[in-house]
Image (spheres, rainbow, N blue to C red):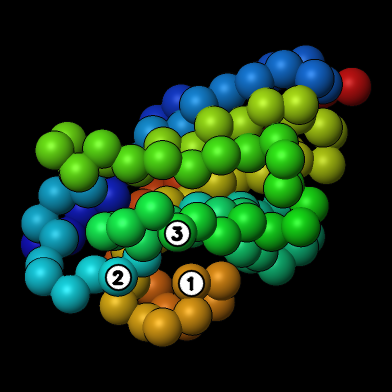
Amino acid sequence: QVQLVESGGGLVQAGGSLRLSCAASGLTFGVLFMGWFRQAPGKEREFVAATRWTGVTAYFAESVKGRFTISRDNAKNTVYLQLNGLKPEDTAVYYCAAGRGSRPTASASYNYWGQGTQVTVSS
């Protein structure tokens, strides 16, 4: 059974930083991408960042480019999302996802989802 467990969310002032972690277990062969999505109150879930499970290619939403980075530790089956230069509009529940689809920015490409971790940025 696949499990994705996020951690690292919290309350931070604008301009601050957080590091989110996603610990994965039970992943089966064939997972291509690990991604992060977020959902703010009253808004649809949106893509934030993704990385290939093997290789170095990373993908970012325009709104977070230059501020967020994504990395992984395959030995620990963990993916990280470093959030720097946080803005109030980054406030959302952040979800980790794993998928076999071919489009890393599309939520439909992801087969497994974590429960989410809240990030709140105060102005």
Residue at screen point 36% across, 61% down: 52
Nearer to us in this view, 105 or 2: 105
Point out residue 21 in the picture as x, y percentages from the top left corner: 39, 34
Q: Which residue is mark 3?
A: 57
Point out residue 34 in the picture as x, y percentages from the top left corner: 37, 58
Nearer to us: label 2 or label 3: 3
- Left or right of residue 36: residue 65: right
**Dot 3 crowding, Cα within 10 Å, few <14, some 14–19, many 20+:** few
| Mark count | 3
Asked whether the residues under the numbered discs 3 and 1 touch, taking CB atoms below 8 Å apart as contact, a structural biologist would say: no
**Dot 1 crowding, Cα within 10 Å, few <14, some 14–19, many 20+:** many
Residue at screen point 82% across, 32% down: 87
**Dot 2 crowding, Cα within 10 Å, few <14, some 14–19, many 20+:** many
Q: Which kind of residue does numbered mark 1 sit on?
A: Pro
Helix, strand or loop at disc 3? loop
Nearer to us in this view, 17 or 73: 73
Q: Quadrant of the N terminus?
A: bottom left
Asked whether the residues under the numbered discs 2 and 1 touch, taking CB atoms below 8 Å apart as contact, a structural biologist would say: yes
Q: Earlier in the sequence, mark 2 or mark 3?
A: 2
